[in-house]
Image: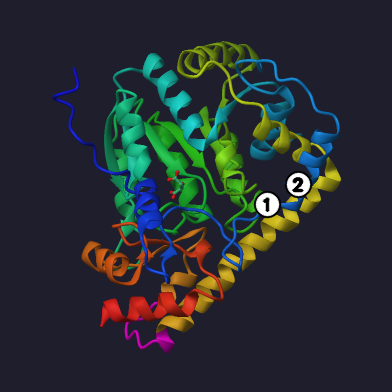
Amino acid sequence: IFTAVEMAPRDPILGLNEQYAADTNPNKVNLGVGVYYDDNGKLPLLECVKAAEADMMKAPSARGYLPIDGIAAYDNAVKGLVFGADSEPVKSGRVATIQAIGGTGGLKVGADFLKKVNPDAKVLISDPSWENHRALFTNAGFNVEAYPYYDAEKRGVNFDGMLEALGSAASGTIVVLHACCHNPTGYDLTPDQWDQVIGVVRAKHLVPFLDMAYQGFGYGIAEDGAVIGKFVAAGLSFFVSTSFSKSFSLYGERVGALSVLCADKDEAARVLSQLKIAIRTNYSNPPIHGGAVVAAVLGDPARRAVWEKELAEMRERIKAMRHKLVDGLKAAGVQRDMSFITQQIGMFSYSGLTKDQMVTLRNEYGVYGTDTGRMCVAALNSKNIDYVCQSIAKVLS
Ligand code: LMR
């Protein structure tokens, strides 16, 4: 029965991890997947997480099934983080939130639900976007197309192109937007541009799906989440997927969420009932540990303060590495102006290197980024940065 099964290509992001693991180059550096490493090249275990886990271990508990939509305290904490605990949507009970298996799980539950509600809708993702957006919505049964986003020449957002594409989309089109720290380009919309996008979304009756995988990695938790307030103020219904993989350094716990802002409490209850069917038929109900940790941190003011401090440290270290990268590339002899790297935000730099250059960087120097030229600057540190700069300089010479 499997004779006709073809070998699938490696995942464009996670596949690099496999290749990196097999690489024997002692100088190898993994700037492929979006993971934050500290200055010693170690994946951090956050103090807030360690403390919450220590408390949990003091009173070990048996593991029954969670409710289909997850831990109630977790879902409430997510609502608070995304919309504001005292916000009107939360107070009026019109947000349906479910604990999801990572941000990817939130996207998939949302996609499956949307496929039931609006099976003929088209999905628009940014060009370029996170590699998995297209695959995920395609596998959920949608026809996926892209709206212009990146302007390579001016190094920034092709905002006119984006607005025009959204303006000519059919009513009901699902538009996937990056709430902050656009992956892969690192270029976000300005507040004024968001207002214009929201205007078109409303006028054209588009369905916004905000992917918020990096809240806190741009300018701060509230600052990065401000776009949500804009969509609320515009009176729109919309989807938000949340990931705590990066912000809590809990990648392997797969802890994320999906929130759907509805018109009223009754609608939210009906939407939640349908989200639960999507969950039940995919994986039944979520695992406990990661959600319990995040709920314990977000629900305790002292611990939350520790988390915010640790998150700020990660954010600031990434920014410092961006500056070091620009200086280091110049010192290594790179002629072209690379200062754009400090204008980009979040974990990634869209370097402008071609696929061939990225492949050479990988194969000859063991420096891994995606074929699109994306490099995870959050994996740079004071020990590997010189080698990375010299390798890039050689590839560009
Ligand atoms: C990335 O873009 O590298 C991260 O979001 C990790 C992933 O799942 O692809």
Magenta span: helix, strand or loop, mainly?
loop
List x then y, in percent, for residue 240. 53, 34
**Camera-side residue of 260 and 20:** 20
Q: Is residue 273 above or below residue 301?
A: above
The magenta stretch spans which residues?
330-338
The image shows residue 64 at horizontal and vertical percentages of 69, 16
At mark 1, the secondary structure is loop
Residue labelled with disc 2: 50
Q: Is residue 237 left or right of residue 115?
A: right
Q: Is residue 122 visible?
A: no
Find out whether the residues at labels 2 and 1 contact each other: C-beta distance under 8 Å. Answer: yes
Amino acid type at circle 2 is: Lys
The extreme left residue here reads 4
Asked which quadrant contains residue 136, the reply is top left
Q: Could you tell whether 295 is left or right of 343 in the image?
A: right
**Depicted 358 relative to depicted 276: above or below:** below
Q: Residue 119 or 40: which is nearer the viewer?
A: 40
Q: Is residue 191 left or right of residue 363?
A: right
Residue 351's place in the image compared with 168, above or below, is: below
Query: Which comes before the other along the chain, label 2 or label 1?
Result: 1
Could you say where residue 102 lies in the image, as x and y percent from the top left?
Answer: 54, 35
Task: Using the numbered discs, state the Cα–Cα distance from disc 2 to disc 1 in whole angstroms.
Answer: 7 Å
Q: Amino acid at mark 1?
A: Leu
Q: Tell me: residue 345, above or below residue 335.
A: above
The residue carrying mark 1 is 45
